Structure formats: C-alpha cells, structure tokens
Image (spheres, rainbow, N blue to C red):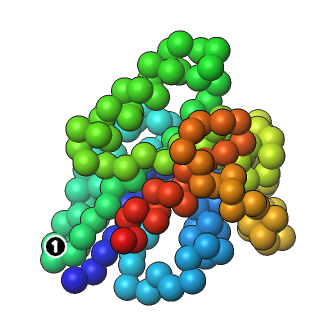
Amino acid sequence: MSKQIIFGVETNGKARTDIVYIKDTIRKFYNDYSGINFEYVPMGTKTAFNNKKTKADIRKYIKNNPNGTSHIVYCIDTDQFECNQEQLKLNKSIEDFCLRNGYKLIWFCHDIEEVYIGKSVRNKDKVSISKRFKQKGEIEKVDENKLRKDQQTSGHSNILNVIDSCLK
C-alpha cells in the first residue's frame, strides 16, 4: 500500500514558489521517503481552499492512489493576522475546513519567505528569490527549530510537525 501527501499550496501553477521551499524541506529533513508520493495542488491564493478546482485536483490525486493512504495538507501563509481581523477570520475558516475534512494544516508565519529567508518579499520577486534559495542550497541555513513550532510566531512554521504526523 502506497502513501501520498497532497499539499494544497498558495502558489500558482506557473510560479510554483512555495513548492520549492517544501521540496527542499523534505529533502533536508527526511532521508528515507521512498515509497511516499508528494503531490502539489497550486491554489493560486489561500482563498481558493474550498473552490471546485482545488477540490477536483485533490480528488484526482486520491483517485490515482486507490489502494493507498492519502494525507491532504493545506499550506498557508498566516499573513498579518495579529492586526487584520479579516485575515484572522479567513485563517480560522481554513483551519475549520481542514478539521471538518480530516485534513492537516501547515502555516507559515507570516509568510513562507519570512520563514525560509528571514523576510517577506514582493510578489514580483518571489520566483527569482525561490530559484536562488534552491540553487544556493540555502535550506542548509534554515534552523530546524524554526520549522517545529506549535504556536504561530513570526518567522516560524509547523511544517515538520505536520509532515512527521503524516509519515507515522
């Protein structure tokens, strides 16, 4: 029986920037992941967490693994939730959606770039910065403790905790 983790990511299908950071994280922190498929569903924006295309793309991957285990994991930037009630409300809606559906939730506080490179970047710079991150092997500079948080604090994530729970 095969296992797969399906990541719903905020990036769009062309840029695929979030996928760069997640793939590098898996390569660095998980030595033996043979027999596990990692699939990515680009949502374009976290507001698309519940739209028809996102759900259809996830169902397609599940259907392609009929005798295996599928873990669905949504990956979102928390954005400036501390000072933006609309952002806080949206994040809570996504969290509730995941709980209702048995999905897991990875958060990056405040965004994935802040977690991995230490600062937020403009949208127009995300592709070039993620390419540089990959090419220069900058994942090696990322402190594991930043990726193992239970509480949302600036520049941190729960990504390793969630992936660990999927691999058990």
Vertical arrangement, residue 154 with respect to residue 158, above or below: above
Name the residue at the left extreme. 67
Q: Is residue 164 left or right of residue 99?
A: right
* Residue 29 drawn at (x, y percent): 61, 73
Q: Residues within 10 Å of mark 1 (few under 14, many from 20)?
A: few
State the image quarter where residue 167 is shown: bottom left
Residue type at mark 1 is: Pro
Q: Percent x, y for residue 147?
A: 63, 55
Q: Of helix, strand and loop, which one carries label 1?
A: loop
Q: Quadrant of the N terminus?
A: bottom left
Number of marks:
1
Look at 62% across and 30% down and name the residue there. 79
Residue 14 visible, this orientation: no
Relative to 30, say whether 131 is above or below: above
Which residue was labeled with disc 1? 66
Quadrant in the rendering for residue 148: bottom right
Identify whether 23 is placed above or below 57: below
Q: Is residue 152 visible?
A: yes
Residue 95: give x, y in percent of width and height: 38, 35
Front residue of 2 and 42: 2
The image shows residue 138 at horizontal and vertical percentages of: 80, 66
Q: Residue at x 50, y 21 (%)?
A: 88
Residue sitting at 29 percent across and 40 percent down? 99
For the C terminus, the quadrant is: bottom left
Name the residue at 59% across, 36% down.
152
